[in-house]
Image (cartoon, coloured by chain):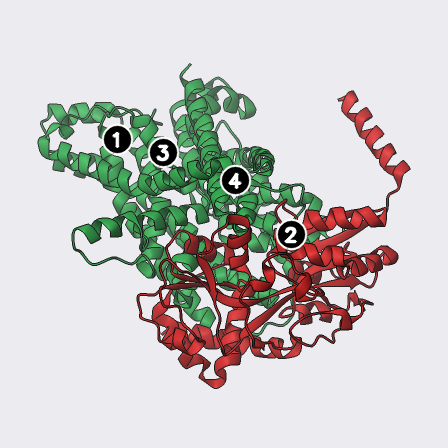
């Protein structure tokens, strides 16, 4: 059977997809131009690959497993301050790594609050260093993402189904099995694959909390090959391995599993007659309390030490904050220009394997993309003068897989419910985008744009490799403060960073939803 | 829009009219922030050169290797002796033209390409409030109770971490692996760079941190805090030096030479301690700023020549990795 006609074409998407692939392939080409014979792989590299896969699998599985009760509780409870809580719970995902690690140490570290509490109870102290510490930090980062993705799915279950289930007097367990499990089966593999890829490219977390060289990741091996040994071919080879691992996981998850195709939710709690029992209430309360405690306490500690350091913050930090804002703005524009056509292209196909293209930028080590482009730009122009632009584009590429995961279902749904009408009205191309897709997918687009802006604000990225002193970004300035013994001022800068990331995320997310409703 | 164009035109025209020669100095990233040594160097040199000194920061060695002959640098500042061999191999550098005899380093310096401008030694810094009995020697440090925790830096990502593995190699030689295994229970964790380690130390997460003999000076002179001290070991401390080098193909050879001379001047040297929190390379101790001569420094200095450091590097890192991966 021929594929049914669609009111939008995939041409723009194919162009966007080609650009993404080209951006990554050209970077590899750039490195290839300069690479010489490599020293080859030793025991250290194989150990790094093994550790990377183990910690990524564990982190992804635990993140999505914990997200199920948390998202379920948030979906069916109408708490006061629920919206604020959901926004705040998203914060760890967009925090710069070093800030988040310091926050985690304040809670779980040797002198942290948990060990202080254990001490008063006469319990032995717990150590955060080692594989479990790495996984703990990755869950801290990615539980919010998994929760948001699941929550979005949960919101999209039509309320009528729960009403019907209540009328039929189905037990909570039957409701879970018949309504919620199919939903989970559709969302979880994609979310897990995404988190697996994020953890695959982890570097500073594994290094700081891993406790030693046992916890070496592939990304660290790439960093060493590039910056210390200057062995570009080894760095490129390691990047390819990382790419294959990420691509394999993504294709597996996205291709085997059918796409999510549900109505876009408005993120309001659904009326749930099955959640009224005392046991359900108690369970949801515990899930929310534990989740919020785990995610918010480290943030709270970042905020407290930041407030103490705020008076120490020099004026240059504010200038850097403006630069970061600019980078984030460009990132969001680049992202939208690439993600929307790409998402449209994916949405008119039944399966989502094309979505794997989106993972290229994230899994191909930003360090390699930055270096590759440096080599390519160098003969033509001064790479340093373009460092902010390269940073912005790399940030957009890294945010692309998240954006696609978020936006594609909305576009698919808009096309399913209104596609035939558009065809009848002979409405195609841009007109369909303008009047049908964008208004309906706006909440998801806002969420994706907010996430991109926030990630971009917190990313240290390629700018550290070659920076113009007058174009310092906020994370870089924060690192410089730390490097100059000014830890209090750095904590103040971290708080500004946190506030800006949350502010950007919140304005896009809420702004788009507000606009969609009016 | 038109106004912007006009303004841009005026700016360009005035720049062309002034024709101030520009000296481009590549430097480490920490250099150019207002609390780094950069601003002091920039003001000081611009006062005498009639030129515009512009810093360009980033990761020095990879950048020089990537840019090759197309580099825009006239002068490169901040390469340590553990990485100068890679920079030298690019063939980009010219002799520095200064008198090595004027240097006041604790080691002999004969290199005519890379000129030291400051130095310090790798050292473990501790908090006197939490470490009552600091180890009196490196040997004693290996025997510390397991609950005294130290943070170190990864030799694969940081120059300070690299200095540590070379230090251990130089003190323990063939027994370096065994030394690392003895120290392992005390190592709380390994971080990417010095900043992350030092942050954990000041936050009280660790009792000791791999840093420099000059770190306590910052706390003493900038914060009036005398609780941070460097443990001094009779086995000796690894010597760390930062250098400045001149690019042979520079289009500003006179300015570059004037800059090398400025680095050796008293005005530059005497501002190094407070601006860079390290020791000046060409200034006798009696001319150090108030209080600096009292800073406890090691009697014995361990140092690998550039060639030895390069040759030992891979082995020292692998010994460290293998011992701590057990």
- Quadrant for residue B139, please give it: bottom left
Residue A198: percent from left, percent from top: 43, 50
The answer to whether dots 2 and 4 both sit on one chain is: no
Dividing the image into 4 quarters, which one contains the C terminus of chain B? bottom left
Rendering colour (chain A) = green
Instruction: From the image, tell me which residue sits under label 4.
Output: A456
Label 2 or label 3, whichever lies nearer to me, is: 2
Q: Which mark is residue A75?
A: 1
Label 1 or label 2, whichever lies nearer to me, is: 2
Dividing the image into 4 quarters, which one contains the N terminus of chain B? top right
Residue A433: percent from left, percent from top: 51, 24
Q: Residues within 10 Å of mark 2 (few under 14, many from 20)?
A: many
Residue A44: percent from left, percent from top: 46, 71
Q: Tell whether label 1 touches label 4 (CB within 8 Å).
A: no
Q: CA distance from mark 3 to mark 1?
A: 16 Å
Asked if residue A427 can be seen in this view, the reply is no
Instruction: From the image, tell me which residue sits under label 3.
Output: A88
Helix, strand or loop under label 4 = helix
- Quadrant for residue B143, please give it: bottom left
Q: Chain of mark 3?
A: A
Would you say B3 lies left or right of B181 here? right
Q: CA distance from mark 2 to mark 3?
A: 36 Å
Q: CA distance from mark 1 to mark 2?
A: 50 Å
Chain displayed in red? B
Q: Chain of mark 1?
A: A
* Residue at image coords 74%, 54%: B25
Helix, strand or loop under label 1 = helix
């Amino acid at each position: 059977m021929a594929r049914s006609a669609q009111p939008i074409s995939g041409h723009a998407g194919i162009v966007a997809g080609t650009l993404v692939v080209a951006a990554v392939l050209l970077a590899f080409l750039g490195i290839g131009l300069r690479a010489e014979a490599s020293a080859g792989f030793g025991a250290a590299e194989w150990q790094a690959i093994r550790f990377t896969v183990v910690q990524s699998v564990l982190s992804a599985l635990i993140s999505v497993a914990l997200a199920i009760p948390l998202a379920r509780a948030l979906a069916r409870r109408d708490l006061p301050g629920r919206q604020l809580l959901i926004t705040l719970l998203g914060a760890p995902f967009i925090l710069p790594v070093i800030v988040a690690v310091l926050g985690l140490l304040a809670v779980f570290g040797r002198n942290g609050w948990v060990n202080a509490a254990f001490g008063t109870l006469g319990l032995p102290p717990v150590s955060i260093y080692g594989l479990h510490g790495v996984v703990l930090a990755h869950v801290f980062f990615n539980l919010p993402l998994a929760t948001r993705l699941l929550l979005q799915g949960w919101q999209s279950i039509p309320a009528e189904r729960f009403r019907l289930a209540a009328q039929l007097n189905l037990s909570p367990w039957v409701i879970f099995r018949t309504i919620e499990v199919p939903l989970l089966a559709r969302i979880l593999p994609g979310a897990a694959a995404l988190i697996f890829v994020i953890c695959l490219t982890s570097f500073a977390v594994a290094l700081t909390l891993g406790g030693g060289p046992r916890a070496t990741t592939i990304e660290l091996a790439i960093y060493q090959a590039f910056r210390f040994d200057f062995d570009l071919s080894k760095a490129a080879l390691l990047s390819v391995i990382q790419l294959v691992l990420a691509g394999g996981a993504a294709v597996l998850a996205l291709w085997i599993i059918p796409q999510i195709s549900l109505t876009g939710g408005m993120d309001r709690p659904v009326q749930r007659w099955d959640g009224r029992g005392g046991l359900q209430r108690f369970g949801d309360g515990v899930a929310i309390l534990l989740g919020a405690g785990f995610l918010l306490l480290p943030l709270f500690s970042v905020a407290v030490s930041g407030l103490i350091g705020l008076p120490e913050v020099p004026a240059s930090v504010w200038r850097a904050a403006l630069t970061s804002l600019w980078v984030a703005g460009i990132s969001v524009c680049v992202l939208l220009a690439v993600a929307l056509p790409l998402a449209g292209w994916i949405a008119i196909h039944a399966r989502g394997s094309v979505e794997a293209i989106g993972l290229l930028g994230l899994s191909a080590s930003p360090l390699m993309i930055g270096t590759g482009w440096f080599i390519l730009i160098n003969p033509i122009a001064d790479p340093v003068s373009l460092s902010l632009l390269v940073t912005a584009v790399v940030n957009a590429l890294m945010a692309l897989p998240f954006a696609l995961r978020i936006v594609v279902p909305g576009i698919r749904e808009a096309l399913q419910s209104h596609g035939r009408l558009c065809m009848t009205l002979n409405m195609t191309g841009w007109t369909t985008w303008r009047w049908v897709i964008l208004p309906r997918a706006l909440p998801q687009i806002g969420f994706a744009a907010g996430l991109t802006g926030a990630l971009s604000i917190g990313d240290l990225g390629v700018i550290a490799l070659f920076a113009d002193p007058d174009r310092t970004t906020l994370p870089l300035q924060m690192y410089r403060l730390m490097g100059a013994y000014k830890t209090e001022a750095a904590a103040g800068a971290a708080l500004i960073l946190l506030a800006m990331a949350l502010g950007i995320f919140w304005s896009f997310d809420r702004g788009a939803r507000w606009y969609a409703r009016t | 829009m038109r106004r912007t164009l006009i303004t841009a035109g005026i700016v360009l025209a005035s720049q062309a009219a002034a024709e101030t020669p520009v000296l481009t100095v590549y430097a480490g990233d920490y250099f150019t922030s207002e609390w780094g040594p950069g601003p002091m160097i920039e003001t000081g040199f611009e006062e005498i050169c009639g030129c515009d000194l512009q810093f360009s920061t980033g990761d020095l060695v990879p950048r020089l290797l990537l840019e090759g002959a197309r580099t825009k640098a006239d002068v490169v500042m901040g390469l340590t002796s553990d990485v100068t061999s890679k920079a030298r191999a690019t063939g980009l550098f010219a002799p520095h033209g200064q008198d090595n005899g004027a240097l006041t380093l604790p080691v002999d310096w004969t290199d005519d390409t890379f000129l030291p401008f400051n130095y310090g030694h790798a050292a473990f810094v501790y908090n006197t409030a939490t470490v009552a009995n600091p180890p009196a020697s490196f040997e004693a440090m290996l025997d510390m109770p397991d609950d005294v925790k130290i943070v170190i830096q990864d030799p694969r990502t940081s120059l300070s971490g690299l200095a540590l593995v070379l230090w251990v190699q130089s003190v323990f030689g063939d027994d370096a692996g065994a030394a690392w295994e003895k120290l392992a229970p005390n190592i709380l964790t390994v971080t990417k760079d010095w900043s992350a380690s030092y942050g954990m130390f000041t936050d009280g997460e660790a009792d000791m941190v791999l840093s420099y003999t000059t770190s306590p000076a910052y706390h003493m002179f900038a914060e009036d805090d005398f609780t941070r001290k460097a443990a001094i070991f009779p086995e000796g401390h690894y010597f760390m030096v930062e250098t400045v080098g001149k690019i042979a193909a520079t289009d500003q050879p006179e300015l570059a030479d004037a800059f090398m001379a400025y680095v050796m001047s008293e005005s530059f040297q005497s501002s190094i301690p407070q601006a860079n929190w390290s020791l000046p390379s060409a200034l006798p101790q009696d001319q150090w700023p108030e209080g600096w001569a009292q800073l406890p420094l090691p009697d014995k200095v361990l140092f690998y020549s550039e060639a030895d450091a390069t040759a030992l590097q891979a082995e020292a890192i692998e010994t460290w990795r293998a011992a701590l991966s057990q």
